Amino acid sequence: MFPEIADFLQIAPWPPRPDGLFWSALTLVVGGLLGEAVQRGLGLPRIVGYSLAGMALALGGLGPNDGRLGGGLRVIVDLALALLLFELGSRLRLRWLRLNPALLWTSAVESLLSFVAVAGALVGVGVAIPVALAGATLTVAVSGAVVGRVAGELKADGQVTERMIMLTVLNTLFAVLAHRLVLGALHLDRSGDWLRAVLQPLYVFVGSVVVAFALARLVAWIARRLDLRNENSVLLLLGMILLALTLARWFNLSTLLVPLLAGVVLRNSTERPWVWPRHFGTAGGVLVLMLFVVVGSAWSVQALMMGAVAAAVMLAARFAAKAVAVVALARWSGIEARQGLALSLTLAPISGTTLVLFAELHHAQPEIAAALAPIVLSAIAIMELAGPLAVQWGLRMAGDVPSGATRPGGLAA
């Protein structure tokens, strides 16, 4: 009966088969509902709900559970991360580093200790040294997406919040550079090509700086003529960032460094304060939701069973290293030890940045990426839930969150 009715109404095929558009729409609906549910009911950051939606996809075997990002998913992740990193970079004041060089030393020490601790932990659980070094570079960076989103949702403001942003920007820069250097060293070990091992990381850094500077100058030029906070200008800004990312992909530059450095250049090449619409409006909000869904789905039950223990050891070593460095240098940098501990908590997350670096590793060194996949993907799965909570706890411990922000049973203040 139903086939005949469908044929009469020219409904084909019958029965309807869900396609990519259907699953994308369903993901947006479920992710949005879960985000509101955890925020209103539990007072947790909305991205926890988005990540839960992604985890449901992973349990159903529908996510990129090998950590490789296909064309469409990579565009979503790159653009969403670019928006958040650009916004984060535009809040970094280089003058603060000149006035308080202890901040730069804190970032350098916590990044280096994190690298050494993670590499040592991985070797301790039986991972080969080259694989351990590659894995260590993936986890140096704090997730700019998580800290930016949680801080914005909580309306956090204060010494710890500003230092969290500063350290996140700096250790992302260090992580990308270290990642490229390790890739060069691995290539050298395999082929003996010294010239490529040295010049390729240098090319990536210099090329990313050039594209970032061009993007920053273009945004500044347009901002003098248009209000970048209205809807049409937001779309223009999204287009410029997407164009810069496309250039970065074409020329094998860093899709992480370009938006981050562009934000830093923009913030420090002019005296005007840059106030962006939250995550660049509705389109940006959709991309951010999809980012956490995609990252939350980038694991499998099999990977978790194989790598969860090693991932937990690695994450514990990473947090301990960052906490030791930040707390030890807290007073020198101008904050109390308790604030240093709170700051350490906010540096716990790994998420989209690690996944992008892992995708690059998979492209350049598939054998090493395959060995790391269960550990790295398990670590991302763990921190997709624990990371936002750590940032929220740290900011609340520091007293940087206004009273009433994201209380259960109500909207964010």
Image (cartoon, rainbow, N blue to C red):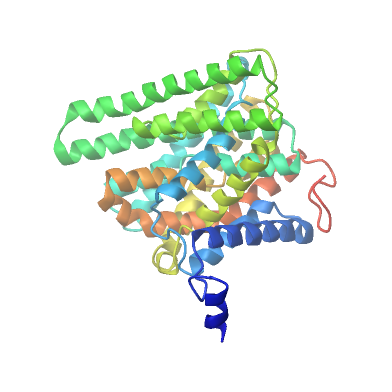
* Image-based side of 262 in relation to 150, left or right: left
**In this view, 133 is above or below 43:** above
For image coordinates 57% across by 72% down, the residue present is: 9
Q: Nearer the viewer, residue 179 or 331?
A: 179
Q: Quadrant of the C terminus?
A: top right
Q: Residue 302: x percent and y percent? A: 40, 69
* Image-based side of 197 in relation to 63, left or right: left
Residue 109 seen from this side: no
Report the number of discs: 0
For image coordinates 60% across by 37% down, the residue present is: 327
Residue 224 seen from this side: yes
| Among the 4 quarters of the image, the one containing residue 167 | top right
* Image-based side of 174 in relation to 287, left or right: left
**In this view, 332 is above or below 402:** above
Looking at this view, name the residue that lies furthest to the bottom: 1
Q: Residue 401: x percent and y percent? A: 77, 41
For image coordinates 59% across by 58% down, the residue present is: 25
Q: Nearer the viewer, residue 103 or 368?
A: 368
Q: Residue 398: x percent and y percent? A: 73, 40
Q: Residue 205: x percent and y percent? A: 38, 25
Q: Quadrant of the N terminus?
A: bottom right
Q: Nearer the viewer, residue 213 or 401?
A: 213
| Among the 4 quarters of the image, the one containing residue 247 | top left
Looking at this view, name the residue that lies furthest to the left: 192
For image coordinates 45% across by 61% down, the residue present is: 299
